Image: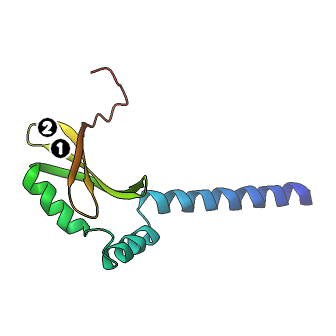
Amino acid sequence: EDIVMNTRSVLTLIAGIGLAASLQYALGGDEDDAQAAALQKSGEIMSKDDILQKVRTEHPGKIRETELKKKGGQYIYEIDVVGDDGKKKEFSYDAKTGKFLSAENDDDDGDDDD
């Protein structure tokens, strides 16, 4: 009986930790924001606001999501935009220089058949 009770307690604890970690990841977490702020302060990256201003000028539409990622030692802003034409695109910018890197069609259906 004690073993069953301890197993349930451990499983409940693990589930709670998993839920908390999922929420932290989904919400963008304070640690990510703190890291981005430190990178901006050190001059490693441009501010998110500056990048978004640039995106709004170059790619009219509604910004849906912005992510800061590190790829191959380079920080990249990935910005999802629904254009005025209704098409979804993902734009990539060098986070340090603000240079436009690439654009991709962004289909949420997971279907690669175009």
Residue toward you, 53 or 98: 98
Crowding around mark 2 (Cα neighbors within 10 Å: few <14, some 14 to 19, many 20+) is few
Whether residue 80 is visible here, answered yes or no, is yes
Marks 1 and 2, how far apart at CA: 6 Å
> The C terminus appears in which quarter of the rendering?
top left
The residue pinned by badge 1 equals 82
- Picture residue at 42% right of the left edge, 57% below the top: 73
Q: Position of residue 61 (x, y in %)?
A: 11, 48
- In percent of width and height, residue 41 lies at 32, 79
Residue shown at 15% from the left, 50% from the top: 62
Mark 2 lies on residue? 86
Dividing the picture into quadrants, the one containing residue 49 is: bottom left
Q: Amino acid at mark 1?
A: Val
- Residue 77 occupies which quadrant of the picture? bottom left
Which is more toward the observer, 85 or 43? 43
Asked if the residue at tag 2 contacts the one at tag 1, i.e. Cβ–Cβ closer than 8 Å, the answer is: yes
Q: Secondary structure at mark 2?
A: loop
Instruction: Specify the amino acid type for callout 2.
Output: Gly
